[in-house]
Amino acid sequence: PRCGDPELAASDLLLQNGSLVLDGATGRLLRERRLDRAEAVAYLACYRRFGLTALLFESHERGGACLFDTEPANERLARYLEIRRREEANTDRDCPRRVERLEDHLDADPSALASIDHPERIAPAREAMEALDLPNSRVAVLGLIGRGGSGPAQFLEVFHREVSKELAFVDYCEIRKIPLERTAAIGDGRNDLELLRRVGLGIAMGNAGPALKEIADHVAPRHDEDGLAVAVREHLLG
């Protein structure tokens, strides 16, 4: 388990930007939206054409592994893979691993494709992917990953057209019979915008961008100032 608190560890999970919803106590799949494999093949060709290291996220049914077939092209991607290996080492999910060819693993619909690289390398790949205008999927740059010695980096991902945190949470509330007006969400990224608009109480972290702060009901301190703990204590446990 990733959490030492048994009660918290049993919480239901919304993963991979909402493509996957799991029962936390049993691991049972509640809902999954997968990327069409034919469209995944077309996107994979774009990643390769622009020299990006592609990551293939397999479906939950196949173990949910993160696969790649070339060495990470930059320090930030290598760090991301190492963090995932550490996090998943003691779970029942497969750790990230290198395979011979990603195409050999596209005989079934995957969860998503992604890459991490510098913004100037991400931009032309994103433009080419969006120009494909494929009907069952969408392309997203999920925000700045952070800064380090290698400079800024972005996460370029493609997934099912109806995948989002907002839609996954709405589905989850319907499954669990929870009124949306009695829910709360805390976020700091652009992909949290619609979710915070939809819930009963939306809280933006202090390190979030102006757009998210503008629509939030409350703004917590930054993530490196224990903002999450402050938000939970002041707005959810009070």
Image (spheres, helix red, strand yellow):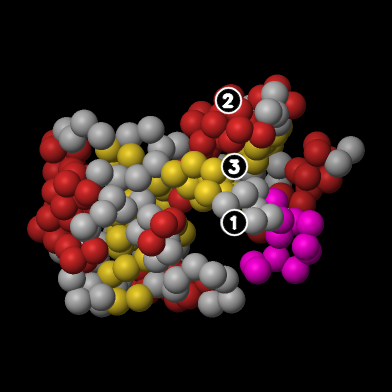
Q: Is residue 189 left or right of residue 2?
A: left
Q: Is residue 160 left or right of residue 172?
A: left
Q: Nearer the viewer, mark 3 or mark 1?
A: 1
Identify the element where label 2 is drawn.
Answer: helix
Which residue is situated farthest in the right direction here?
238
The C terminus lies in which quarter of the figure?
top right
Residue 173 makes an appearance in the image: yes
Is residue 176 depicted above or below 57 in this figure? above
Is residue 228 depicted above or below 215 in this figure? below
Specify the amino acid type for callout 2: Arg
Specify the amino acid type for callout 3: Gly
From the image, tell me which residue sits under label 2.
197
Give the residue drawn at x 38%, y 55%: 59
Of residues 120 and 106, the one nearer the viewer is 106
Give the residue drawn at x 75%, y 68%: 4
Coordinates of residue 178 in the picture (x, y in percent): 70, 29
Gap in angstroms between the C-alphas marked 2 and 3:
11 Å
Gap in angstroms between the C-alphas marked 2 and 1:
29 Å
Of residues 129 and 135, the one nearer the viewer is 135
Q: Which mark is residue 27?
A: 1
Give the residue drawn at x 14%, y 36%: 131
Of residues 166 and 179, the one nearer the viewer is 179
Coordinates of residue 138 in the picture (x, y in percent): 29, 37
Q: Which mark is residue 187?
A: 3
Gap in angstroms between the C-alphas marked 3 and 1:
24 Å
Identify the element where label 3 is drawn.
Answer: strand
Give the residue drawn at x 57%, y 71%: 91
Q: Are marks 2 and 3 in contact (CB under 8 Å)?
A: no
Residue 217 makes an appearance in the image: no
Coordinates of residue 165 in the picture (x, y in percent): 50, 38
In the rendered structure, which segment of residues is drawn in magenta?
1-11
